[in-house]
C-alpha cells in the first residue's frame, strides 16, 4: 500500500491529526455536562490505568532516571498534559462548542511558542525572518478569531476568553515540545508516554481534590463513561501512539505539513456535524496563519536541527 516508510509516516501522522480534529468536534463535546478539571483528569487517568496492563515494565525505567529527568517529566505533564489540556477543553466549553474550527486553528500557533522557548531555554538558533512570519501568524490568528470586530463584541464576548485559553494551550503544548526534546534523548516514546499520562493523572487528581470537584464522579452518566473510554482508546493515547510511530519515519518539516490534517479535519467535521462555515475573512486569515506556521517550521529546519517536532508529548 505504501511505497516506502516515509509515505507510511505521513499517513500515520495525518491520521492521528485527523483523529484529534474529530475529537474536538464530535467526542469531547459529549462531556459538556461535567467540570473541565474532572474531564481532563479522567482523560488521563483512564488511559493510564489501561497502560498499566500493557506497559507495566516501564516502572523499571525509574531506576535509570536522575532528578533532572524527573523534573522534565513533571514539566511535560504539567504543561503538555494538565495546563494545555485544561486550557483547550476550557476554550471549547466557553464557546459552547461553537466556533470549534477557530479554537482548533488557534492551537496551531504552538510552534511560535515552541521556537521562542527553545531559544530562551535551550539556546537554539531562530531562523531568519522568524519575527516576520510569527507576526503574520499572530495577525492571522486575530482576524480568524474576531474578523474586523472588537473582541468584546464577538459571540457575546465569549470569544475573547476562549481565544485566550486557546493561546494558553498553544503556549503550554509548545512548552511541552521543548521539554520533550530533552526527555526523548534518553528514553523511548513508550516510556515518555507512560510517565506523561501517569504524572498528568496525579497532577490532575490533586487539582480535582483541591477544587472540590470529585463529586462529578456521581454526575458522570453512562454516556459520559462511554465517551471517556472511546476517547482514551482512540483520539487520546491511541492517536498519540499512531503519531509517534509515524514520526519515526519523517522529518520535522514533513510532519508539519502532515499535521495540517488537524485543522482541515476540524473544518470538515465542524461543517458536517454542526453546519458551521468560516467567513471569507476567516478563510483568508486561516490560510495566512497556516502558511506562516509552515514557513516558520521550514526556517528552523533550514537553519539548524529541527526545533519543532510538532506536539511532542502534548496532545491528548
Image: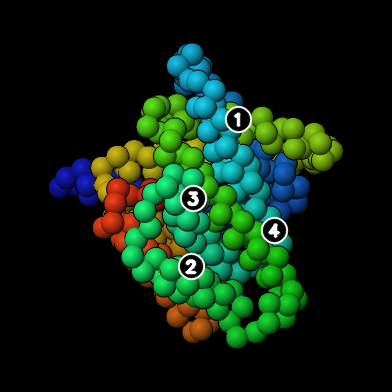
Query: Badges 2 and 4: C-beta atoms under 8 Å apart?
Result: no
Q: Nearer the viewer, residue 133 or 81?
A: 133
Q: Residue at x 49, y 75 (%)?
A: 140
Residue 85 located left or right of residue 61? right
Residue 292 located left or right of residue 22? left
Of the image marks 3 and 2, the number of the one nearer the N terminus: 3
Where residue 204 appears, as percent x and y from the top left, is 69, 36
Crowding near the residue tagged with mark 3, few <14, some 14–19, many ≥20 C-alpha atoms within 10 Å: few
Residue on which disc 1 sits: 199
Residue on which disc 2 sits: 267
Query: Badges 4 and 1: C-beta atoms under 8 Å apart?
Result: no
Q: Nearer the viewer, residue 152 or 44?
A: 152
Q: Residue at x 75, y 51 (%)?
A: 33
Q: Nearer the viewer, residue 6 or 175?
A: 175
- In three-dimensional space, the C-alpha distance between marks 4 and 1, rounded to whole angstroms, equals 24 Å
Dot label at residue 93: 4
Residue 214 located left or right of residue 10? right
Q: Quadrant of the C terminus?
A: top right
Query: Badges 4 and 3: C-beta atoms under 8 Å apart?
Result: no
- In three-dimensional space, the C-alpha distance between marks 2 and 4, rounded to whole angstroms, equals 18 Å
Of the image marks 2 and 4, the number of the one nearer the N terminus: 4
- In three-dimensional space, the C-alpha distance between marks 1 and 3, rounded to whole angstroms, equals 25 Å
Crowding near the residue tagged with mark 4, few <14, some 14–19, many ≥20 C-alpha atoms within 10 Å: many
Which residue reaches farthest left?
Answer: 3
Q: Nearer the viewer, residue 96 or 222?
A: 96
Is 158 located above or below residue 236 in the figure? Answer: below
Camera sees residue 311: no
Residue on which disc 3 sits: 120
Of the image marks 1 and 3, the number of the one nearer the N terminus: 3
Amino acid at each position: 500500500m505504501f511505497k516506502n516508510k516515509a509515505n507510511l509516516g505521513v499517513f500515520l501522522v495525518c491520521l492521528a491529526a485527523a483523529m484529534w480534529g474529530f475529537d474536538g468536534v464530535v467526542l469531547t463535546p459529549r462531556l459538556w455536562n461535567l467540570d473541565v478539571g474532572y474531564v481532563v483528569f479522567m482523560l488521563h487517568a483512564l488511559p493510564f490505568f489501561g497502560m498499566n496492563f500493557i506497559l507495566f515494565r516501564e516502572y523499571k525505567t525509574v531506576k535509570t532516571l536522575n532528578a533532572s529527568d524527573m523534573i522534565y517529566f513533571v514539566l511535560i505533564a504539567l504543561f503538555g498534559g494538565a495546563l494545555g489540556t485544561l486550557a483547550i477543553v476550557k476554550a471549547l466549553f466557553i464557546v459552547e462548542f461553537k466556533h470549534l474550527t477557530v479554537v482548533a486553528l488557534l492551537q496551531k500557533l504552538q510552534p511560535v511558542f515552541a521556537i521562542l522557548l527553545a531559544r530562551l531555554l535551550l539556546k537554539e538558533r531562530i531562523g531568519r525572518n522568524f519575527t516576520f512570519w510569527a507576526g503574520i501568524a499572530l495577525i492571522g490568528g486575530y482576524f480568524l478569531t474576531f474578523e474586523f470586530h472588537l473582541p468584546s463584541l464577538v459571540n457575546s464576548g465569549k470569544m475573547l476568553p476562549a481565544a485566550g485559553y486557546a493561546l494558553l494551550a498553544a503556549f503550554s503544548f509548545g512548552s511541552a515540545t521543548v521539554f520533550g526534546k530533552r526527555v526523548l534523548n534518553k528514553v523511548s516514546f513508550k516510556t515518555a508516554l507512560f510517565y506523561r499520562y501517569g504524572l498528568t493523572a496525579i497532577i490532575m487528581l490533586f487539582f480535582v481534590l483541591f477544587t472540590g470537584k470529585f463529586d462529578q464522579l456521581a454526575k458522570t452518566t453512562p454516556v459520559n463513561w462511554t465517551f471517556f473510554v472511546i476517547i482514551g482508546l482512540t483520539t487520546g493515547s491511541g492517536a498519540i501512539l499512531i503519531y509517534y510511530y509515524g514520526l519515526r519515519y519523517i522529518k520535522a518539516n514533513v510532519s508539519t505539513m502532515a499535521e495540517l490534517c488537524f485543522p482541515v479535519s476540524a473544518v470538515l467535521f465542524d461543517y458536517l456535524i454542526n453546519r458551521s462555515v468560516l467567513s471569507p475573512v476567516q478563510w483568508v486569515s486561516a490560510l495566512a496563519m497556516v502558511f506562516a506556521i509552515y514557513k516558520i517550521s521550514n526556517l528552523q529546519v533550514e537553519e539548524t536541527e529541527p526545533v519543532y517536532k510538532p506536539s511532542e508529548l502534548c496532545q491528548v
